[in-house]
Structure formats: structure tokens, C-alpha cells
Amino acid sequence: MSLRARLFSSPRLFKRVMSLYPPFLGAGVRVAHVADDFSEVVVELRTRPLNRNAFGTHFGGSLYAMTDPFFALMMVARLGRDYVVWDKAAQIDFVRPGTGTVSAHFTLSEAQFEEARAATQNGDKFEPVYRVDVKNAAGKVVARVTKTLYVRQRKPD
């Protein structure tokens, strides 16, 4: 079994590999939870000297990085190898300075996975838009991230 196949069949391995992924490791990003069915992922970012900006708060690039791949990876894990999934667009709105530990809670429902399957069954592309909030320890929103995915079935070789 390939590493990719193992990665998307084992939430525990996915969590470990993503937390050790060099850009995340350097930025202080840690995957705290992955649901058994990949419908939920929780990511945390702790303030460290290497991810602070000039004002002592979280660097905006680190806040974005902690949210970057997860909706696409969750979709890939659920749809499987017969689908192409890419991040197409993103937007981040910084709401307040982030300090301490911040987290992002990603969720995709079974209905959202089914919507992607149904929308692409005739070879059409599907471009869903999902949002995740980055929150501080008090539950206040630090940043809002909107992601647009590109999803379609792979064409036969």
C-alpha cells in the first residue's frame, strides 16, 4: 500500500504526518484531532518566537498556513483516488490579533461529500466554498478563512 493510500486510510497516521510536515512543524502548527471518517479536523497553533510578527502576535502567514490544506485533504480522504481535488482560491480576513494558542475546527458533513459526488458524476467540475474560523482560547474569532475547492472525477487513462 502506498504512503498516500495509508495516509488517507489512517486518521492517526494522517495526524502524525501532518503535524511533522516541515512547514507546519516550523510554524508551530499541530493537528490535534482527526475524526475516524475524516469529517472533522482540529488544528492548533501556539505562539512561538518563530511565528510572531513585529507586534508580538501570530504572524498572518502562520494563521493562513494552519488552515490551508485541510478542506481539500478531507475531501480527498473521503472521495478517494477517483477524484481530483485542488484548492482553487482562498481569502483570509483578520478579525483581531491572535495570541496564545489558536485553533481551527474543520467540519464537512456527509451531505457535503455526497454533494461533491453528485455534482461531479457526469464529469463536471464542482467548486464548493467552505469557511473556517480561527479562534483564540476564549473562543473569539481571530481570523475567518474562506476556501474554494476544485473537485472533479478523474478521467479514465
Image (spheres, grey):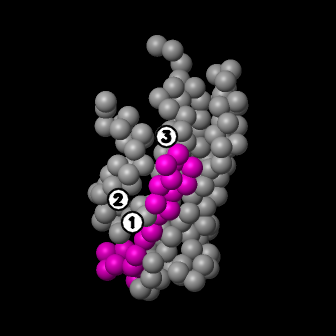
Q: Residue at x 31, y 75 (%)?
A: 50
Residue pointed to by mark 3: 77
Q: Of marks 2 and 3, which one's residue comes earlier in the chain? A: 2
**Label 1 CA crowd tier, 10 Å (few <14, some 14–19, many 20+):** many
Residue pointed to by mark 2: 19
Q: Residue at x 65, y 48 (%)?
A: 109
Per the image, label 3 sits on a secondary structure element best described as: helix
First to last magenta residue range: 33-54
Residue 90: percent from left, percent from top: 58, 54
Closer to us: 7 or 141: 7
User: Is residue 19 on the magenta stretch?
Assistant: no
User: Is residue 48 on the magenta stretch?
Assistant: yes
Q: Is residue 154 left or right of residue 23?
A: right
The answer to which image quadrant residue 93 occupies is bottom right
Say which mark, if any, is on residue 29.
1
Q: In which quadrant will I find the N terminus?
A: top left
Question: Do the residues under discs 1 and 2 have CB atoms within 8 angstroms?
Answer: yes
Q: Residue at x 47, y 83 (%)?
A: 99
Task: Mark 3 vs mark 1: give the one in front.
Answer: 3
Image: 87 above or below 51: above
Q: Residue at x 38, y 34 (%)?
A: 5
Q: Amino acid at mark 1?
A: Val
- Report, in whole angstroms, how far the alpha carbon at label 1 lies from the one at label 2: 7 Å
Closer to us: 150 or 136: 136
Q: Is residue 69 left or right of residue 108?
A: left
